[in-house]
Image: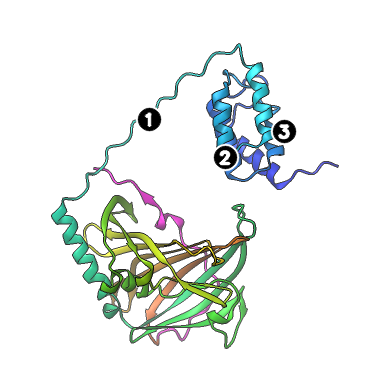
Amino acid sequence: MHRLSRTGLLLIAFLVATLPSVGASQGITLVKLRQFIESSIKQKIPDREIAQYLAHMTLTEKLDEETVETLQGDGAGPRTVAVLKGMIASTSKLAVAAPEVEAPKPPTIPPPPYDEEQEVIKDMTDYALNYTARLPDFVCTQVTRRSVDPRHRGTWQNYDTIVSRLAYLDGHESYEVKTVNNAIVENKSMEQLNGSISTGEFGSLMKEIFDGESNAQFHFDHWTKLRGEVNYVFNYQIDQPRSKFSIEYNHEQRIYAAYKGLVYVNKATHKISRLFAEAIDIPASFPVRKATSQVDYDHEQVGTREFLLPMKATSFITDGEMASKSDIEFRMYRRYGADSKITYDIPEPLDESKQKEETPKP
């Protein structure tokens, strides 16, 4: 009995989604062929399976050596290349594909004037350095969804879901794990659970980036639209001797890595709406190869007032064997001491549109 592999299913899904004209009667264009091969390479589909599908495709346009060499340079395997070279001969009498015409790029907003840029940098620095002092005492529910990609194939598998009570009192965070995969847990901290963890979303990353000791230099990078509002986006970099970006491996090894990132600042309020940090120049002797952290802030009601508080944080870490990701949501903010009737069931994930960026119009 023939069994269709997972990669075969992915190929079929791709064909259904992007190649509606596949078939002996109509065939496909060179553009669709390239899209198919490039997507298959990106998904790490085996060379043998790509070649099998190509063997049943019919081209409507002439394939040349240059296109095959380009696809080979992009990662097409030897079996795929062999089938493509066969297509060169079989399509030699077909018409040459019309040159691709790039779609006109939408108009962009020009960078802010220098004086405006410097004013925003000053305002966002003041805001960051005084951020925690403005926060009220509160509690919230923290939902951490951890997943792993065992072989770096982009096939993420759920590892666990942790629901915790997070208390913020007198400028300090404390965590109390309530459930793991809906099973009640007692007397366990986040640090005692296996797998990757992330802390510091309530101001420490923000403070470290803007602290004078970090000596970060901020430069305007681009405009974006986040949660319906236009944002300045600034880039920065912090050298290793001044870094507090800590990466821990298996609770055994720890380094402080240099890092770079982006700061998103609301154009109307000059308040920070997103922070992104990525470790750079990680020593080759250290097992971790990549580490990133992102925190998104949104308006939340605590008591009778509204504050800009963490909405979601995402941390990503990878070594030579696998990648792990933590998606951390902060839900049900309330005044400290006001959680006597709170339950800790796993809520539905946040709407992904709240993190989606859009290109603002001039």
Quadrant where the C terminus sits is top left
Residue 307 image position (x, y, % from top left)? 30, 72
Residue position for label 1? 103
Cα distance between the residues tagged 3 and 1: 33 Å
Residue at x 48%, y 84% (from the top left corner): 341
Residue position for label 3? 52
Residue 234 image position (x, y, % from top left)? 29, 57
Residue 228 in the image: above or below residue 252: above
Q: In the image, 336: left or right of 123? A: right
Residue position for label 2? 39
Residue 89 in the image: above or below residue 236: above
Q: In the image, 286: left or right of 271? A: right
Q: Which of disc 2 and disc 1 is earlier in sequence?
A: 2
> Which residue is the extreme one toward the left?
115
- Residue 244 lies in what quarter of the image? bottom left
In-front residue for pair 283/145: 283
Q: Is residue 159 covered in magenta?
A: no
Residue at x 62%, y 67% (from the top left corner): 159
Q: Which of disc 2 and disc 3 is earlier in sequence?
A: 2
Question: At label 2, which amino acid type do we have?
Answer: Ser
